[in-house]
Amino acid sequence: MEVLILGGAGMVGQKLLKKIIEKKQINGKSVSKIKLFDIVKAQYPENTEIEIETFTGDISKPETSKNLVASKPEIIFHLAAIVSGQAEEEFDLGWDINAKGSWGLFEAIRSLGDNYLPRLVFTSSIAVFGAPFPEKIPDNFFTTPLTSYGAQKAVSELLLADYSRKGMIDGISIRLPTICVRPGKPNLAASGFFSGIIREPLNGLEARLPVNTSVRHWYASPRSAAGFLMHAAELDTSKLNHRINLSMPGLSATIEDQIDALRRVAGEDTVKLIKHDIDPKIDKIVSGWARDLDTQRALDLGFRAETNFDEIINVYIEDDLKK
Amino acid sequence: MEVLILGGAGMVGQKLLKKIIEKKQINGKSVSKIKLFDIVKAQYPENTEIEIETFTGDISKPETSKNLVASKPEIIFHLAAIVSGQAEEEFDLGWDINAKGSWGLFEAIRSLGDNYLPRLVFTSSIAVFGAPFPEKIPDNFFTTPLTSYGAQKAVSELLLADYSRKGMIDGISIRLPTICVRPGKPNLAASGFFSGIIREPLNGLEARLPVNTSVRHWYASPRSAAGFLMHAAELDTSKLNHRINLSMPGLSATIEDQIDALRRVAGEDTVKLIKHDIDPKIDKIVSGWARDLDTQRALDLGFRAETNFDEIINVYIEDDLKK
C-alpha cells in the first residue's frame, strides 16, 4: 500500500513519518511506499524497510496534485499549509496554498475516477473558531475565524465534507490543538513561547514569557498529533454521519500549570530560566485564542491526548530532548 | 449612486428591483442607476426615474465580475446562484457558479483597489445547516450542509467574511428562509408545494400536498426577502463584530398552520382544492430541512419578517395575485 504525505517536511509530518515507519502498517495493511511532498525536500531516515520517495513543488498548482495522486495512494495525509502569520500577511499566497491547494488536491483525486476512493486525512485547526466563544467550545459551535488561515481551513473542511458526502473521497478533517512542546529552535510565531518556556529551560537556556501566567490555552504533544493522524487514517468513517470535521482532544492548561509541571519534572533551577517580560502585542493576540474545548465526539471515536502537562513535558524529554 | 444586482432576473431580484424603484434611495442616498445582471436578460419596468441597464453572462468567469464592478457600484446585491436541486445534480456547475462565482466577484472588487469599498449583500441560505439539528437552530450553530448548494453558500460566507474582515469589501450575508408564497407557475423544486398549496387554490386550481400536515418549515414572504436585502444594505455593519453571516427571521409553521390560515383568509372551498397525496421521496427530503430557527441576532439588528401565516397569504394576495 502506498501512502502520500503532503507537508512531509514539517514537524508534524516528520513525526507521522516516523510513526508509520515504526508501525509498518495502517489498519492491518502493510505500507510498501511513502511519498513525501513539501515545498522543500523532506528529510527521512535511511535504510528503512519501506521505500520512501520525496517530491517538491507548489501545491497551489493543480498539476502538482495531479502528479502526486496519479499513482493512486490509498492513504493521503494533507498537512501542507502556509502558517497563520504568513497567511495573514500574504493574502493571495495564503488563499492559494491553503484553500485552492486543498481544492486542487480534492479535484485531482476526483478526476482520476475509476472508483479511486482514498482515505484523506486533512489537518485543520482550532483557528476556525474566533472569539468571543464560550470558555469550553462545543463540537457544534460555529466557525467564525478571525484570521485568513482559519477561514482557509474552514473552507477546506467544507469542500472535503462535500466531496466525501458525494462519495468522491473518503475524507476526515482533524482540528489540531496547539502542538507543544515543539522540538527545535525558537521561531517567530506568536504562539512560539508556549513551547519555548518549556523547551529552552530544559536545554539550559533562558526563555521569555510574554503573557500573564493566568493565560489558558489548548495543547497536545507532537506524539499525540501523530497519533490523531494515524487514528484518523484507521477510523471507520461511516461513524461520522457526514460530520467529518472534528476538534481533536487536548489539554486545557494555564501558563501557571505549565510552570508547575516544569518544576515537578525538572526542578526550580530550570523554572528560574523563564524570564517574565510582558509583550502587550502578543498578550492581545493570544487573548483571542481558544482556551478550552469540549471534544466529546472525538473522544467517543477513540482519539486520545495527554491529560496533564507533566505528560506533555515527559513526551518531549523522551522523544526530542538531546536528539 | 449606482446599484448592481446579480441575479436580477430571479423572483427575489425582481422584488428587490421594484422596492428600490419605489424608494428611489438607499440609506438616504438617491439611486441614479441600477445594473441588472443575470444569465438571462432581466425584465424591468419602463419609464422609471432611475436609469436601468441589463447585462447577461456567466458569473463563473472572472471577467464577468470584473466588467460588472468596473463602474464601482456603491451597493452590490449578490443573489446569483444555481438552485439546490441543479447544484446537487451538476457538481461542477454548482461549485463554479455558487462558489467560484462569488469568489471571482469578491476578487474583482478587491483588485480594483483605489479605496473602493462597496456594501455587498450576499443571499445565503438555511441550507448551510444539515440535520440532525435542534428543533430551534441557534445563531451559533455549526454549518454541516448536506447538499452541495449548502456547502457552496457556506464557503461563500467564509470568503466574504474574510474579505470583509480585511477591509476589502463591506460585506454581509443573509440566510433566507424558504420564500413563500412564490408567485408564478408551479416548478419542480422539492420545496415547490409549500407555495403551491396556497397559490394554486387562491387561483382556483388544484394543488398536490405530498407530505404530512404535521411537517414544520421556516418561511418568509417575498416582500420580507426584499425588506431583508434593503435593511442589510442600510445596516451599520460595524455592529456585526466580524460575524457577518446572519440567519434571517422567519415564521415557523406546520402545513396544518398553512391550511388553517388559508381557510381563514379564503374559505373552505379554497382549502378543498388541496389534494393530499403523499410522495415518500419528497417526504424524506423535507424531513432533513430546518424547521425553526432562533434568529435573535437578526431581530436585534432590526430585521423583520411575518409573525403568522395569514400575513404571508395576505402579502401574496396584495402583491402578486392576479397581477
Image (tube, coloured by chain):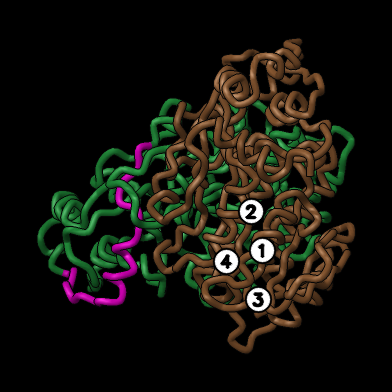
Chain colours: A green, B brown
Q: Report the front residue among B231 and B217.
A: B231
Distance between the alpha carbons at the discs numbered 2 and 4: 31 Å
Is residue B258 toward the left or the right of residue B6 in the image? left
Q: Chain of mark 4?
A: A
Q: Which type of secondary structure does the marked residue at label 3 adopt? A: loop
**Could you say which is closer to the camera, residue A118 or residue B51?**
B51
Observer-nearest residue: B60 or A9?
A: B60
Q: Quadrant of the N terminus of chain B?
A: bottom right
Q: Give the SS element for disc 4.
A: loop
Alpha-carbon span between mark 1 and mark 3: 14 Å
**Residue that lies at the very extreme toward the top in this rendered image:** B277
Residue B123 bears which disc, if any?
2
Please rate how many residues cluster around mark 4, counting C-alpha atoms within 10 Å: few if below 14, some from 14 to 19, many from 20: some
Query: Residue B146, how many percent across, how many down?
Result: 65, 34
Extent of the magenta region:
A273-294
Of the numbered discs in the image, which one, if any, rests on residue B56? none
Q: Secondary structure at mark 2?
A: strand
The residue to which callout 1 is attached is B77
Q: Would you name the residue on which mark 4 appears?
A: A82
Mark 4 vs mark 3: in front: 3
**Cα distance in 3D space between marks 4 and 1:** 33 Å
Q: Could you tell which of marks 1 and 2 lies nearer the N-terminus? A: 1
Question: Where is residue A29 shown, x and y percent of the image?
Answer: 68, 28
Instruction: Inspect the image, locate mark 2, and give the three-letter code of the amino acid beneath it.
Output: Thr
Name the residue: 75% across, 40% down: B183
